[in-house]
Image (cartoon, helix red, strand yellow):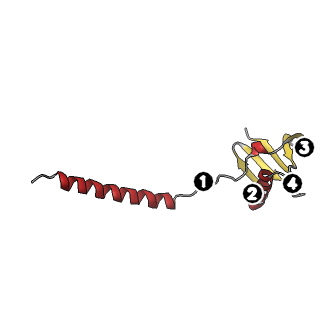
Amino acid sequence: MSEIPFIVKLRDACQMIADAANEYLENKAPKEDKPSWDPSKIKWEEAEGPKGKFERSEDVNNLDFKALVKDLADHKGKLTHENSFYWLFENGVTVGRKKLH
């Protein structure tokens, strides 16, 4: 009698165990904190303050801007994304951003 059917069943069982382990690990892994907003879709204007040049936006009718403001509010008014630092001004409707070095 051939061993091949047994080896095939053993291989298939091991693959099922590996698939189950991968699925478990994927569910337990921390999710990437990818924002729902795209800064390239927001209108930015150059500005200058006491700490140098930066960009600011008050694009209040833009859905990406609204999502950014909400994200900033969830992060106590400051966050870093794709090598830029973002902050929410005290007025709650102006966002600043500055490239990180």
User: Circle 3 sits in a helix, a strand or a loop, which is it?
Assistant: loop
Instruction: Locate the N terminus by quadrant.
Output: bottom left
Q: Which residue is mark 4?
A: 89
Of marks 3 and 2, the one in the foreground? 2
- Which residue: 77% across, 53% down? 68
- Which of 9 and 68 lies nearest the eye of the viewer? 9
- Which of 88 and 39 lies nearest the eye of the viewer? 39
- Mark 3 touches mark 1? (CB < 8 Å): no
What amino acid does circle 2 point to? Asp
What amino acid does circle 4 point to? Phe
Residue 32 numbered mark, or none: 1
Rendered location of residue 90, percent (x, y): 88, 57
- Closer to the N terminus: mark 4 or mark 2? 2
Of marks 4 and 2, the one in the foreground? 2
- Closer to the N terminus: mark 3 or mark 2? 3
The vertical placement of 96 against 71, above or below, is: above
The vertical placement of 91 against 46, above or below, is: below
- Which of 70 and 76 lies nearest the eye of the viewer? 70
- Closer to the N terminus: mark 3 or mark 1? 1
What amino acid does circle 3 point to? Pro
Of marks 3 and 4, the one in the foreground? 4
Q: Which residue is mark 3?
A: 50
Rendered location of residue 39, percent (x, y): 75, 45
Q: Which residue is mark 2?
A: 71
